[in-house]
Image (cartoon, grey):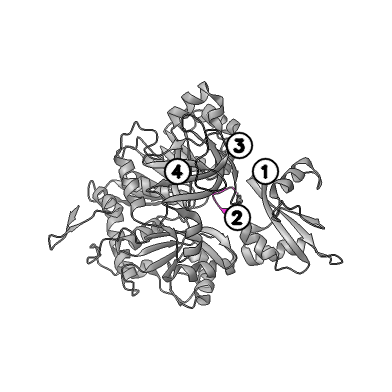
Amino acid sequence: MIINEQQTAVPRTYVDRVLEHWHKDEEAEALVQGAQRLTRGEARRRLFRLGHALRRQGLEPGDGVGLFLANRVDSVLVQLAVHLIGCRVVFLPPEPGPGELAALVEQSRARVVVTDPLFARRAADAAGRSVHAPTLVSLGPCAQPCPDLLALAAECPAERPDGVPAPAADEAVTVLYTGGTLGNPKLAAHSHRLYDTLVDMAEDDPQDSRAGFFPTMDPSTDRVLASTLLTHGSGHLTSIQALVTGSVLVVLPEFDAGAALTVLREERITATMFVPPMLYAVLDHPECVPGALPALRRIVVGGAATSPSRLQQAVEVFGPVLSQGYGQSEALGITAFGAEDLAAEGARRPELWRSCGRAICDTEIEIRGEDSTLALPVRQVGEVCVRGETVMLGYFEDPRRTAEALHDGWLRTGDMGYLDAEGYLYLVDRAKDIIVTGGTSDNVYSRVLEDFLLTLPGVRNAAALGVPDEEYGEAVQIFLATAEGVDVDPGAVGAAVTAELGELYTPRGTVLLKQLPTTNVGKVDKKALRAAWTSGDFGTP
């Protein structure tokens, strides 16, 4: 608890935990990005100034602030500043196209949108489409006619903003984009209990491999690299766990295997998180050889299914430092598999290389059948359902879809898998059809892509799949059922997708069919499409 000037007890938040570290040993490093290096004292003072600058935009506690930011040190501080003044963080990831981004800003009810100068034009377009007319500010000078938040902050006091009420138990403090349909995004809303759990994990027994994604953190020596996007769950988790433990956080502006190896080596990084395509790219780089990264003690891999052979290759190169984690925007932490356990247990039971670990502390997992109420026996495949402190409050401003996903505190993840007798979870399919591509943690949401494809002339039905790709892990492959007598040009389809949804959604291949296979209930049978594509029925995969 914290006692304010009126001697009123106020619950301690995770930001208070970060500040406790930043008030000690003020000349120690706190945040690093290339040549930009902030000490703890500098980071604290800049955080306070940013809090005041945001308040001067008319924000009140509980207001939403959209963050359309690149990986920068100041992006980390702005996110902290939003929570510092009692407002709601709304992460705006860079992958949505103009229509989806505008819908995201509108549905999130953001009063202010903070944009990176690189994204300013797109941010201005999205804000301009919103009936709520959010204020646009830029994190530095930009070409759009909007205030420079950093310049405003430089004129503000370096003292903590006061008068901030404690967040209510059921108050949404962070909102994450998690797909949805075109024009109707799903926004996973989390309360402060998520951050309380992360703080508790940091204080748990460091020998407990399920205590968190980065157990055994030592703030005197640990240096954590945020290599995935800060506006995604993986990057957010990585940065928060580093900050609440007092470790140095190093930010990688943009992922490239060579650049990542350089930073890992030169910054003496001890822990980081990769999605599988990132890990594969690093392993395939010519400079990635055994002994190249002697300081590295932990690599967490998550975000998509990982090849067991690639995991074993990583252990051969880096040593027993590889952990696995499983979560989603709706539940940022579900399972973990500690590095020591993975190496030891994997040698005893090779099938465990396919597992994503066991439930983290205070989290329950059940595998349920079609009625979603009865738990299935071990090794029987069903939907993964979870309950715990990392589960979302619900979908922001969306009671219908919240009711579909949450039942008596249990979240239906939409992922299919099974548990073994020892509680290890194995995922066998992603029922939500998220495609992880681009060599980063970027997500392509099939439903959004399919909805748009159905608006194109001559397209009767559409399906999008993630298919194996040696360079990116997964590539976007689309299948179109076209109207008879209509000439659909695959190149024009790809161009239209890029224009509306962004380059991330651009299909790598397009198959034109008279009709798409369907299941007994009339839904597109994606399993049949995947099998036909893999077997080469549509040509060489």
Q: Earlier in the sequence, mark 1 or mark 4?
A: 4
Q: Amino acid at mark 2?
A: Val
Taking 390 as reference, is 350 above or below it? above
> Which secondary structure lies at badge 2?
strand
Rendered image: mark on residue 334: 4
Marks 3 and 2 sit apart, C-alpha to C-alpha, by 24 Å
Marks 1 and 3 sit apart, C-alpha to C-alpha, by 16 Å
Residue depth check, mark 3 versus mark 4: number of the one nearer the observer: 4
Marks 1 and 2 sit apart, C-alpha to C-alpha, by 14 Å
Q: Amino acid at mark 4?
A: Ile
Rendered image: mark on residue 444: 2
Q: Earlier in the sequence, mark 1 or mark 3?
A: 3
> Which secondary structure lies at badge 4?
strand
20 lies left or right of 430? left
What residue is shown with label 3?
284
- Residue at 72% across, 59% down: 462
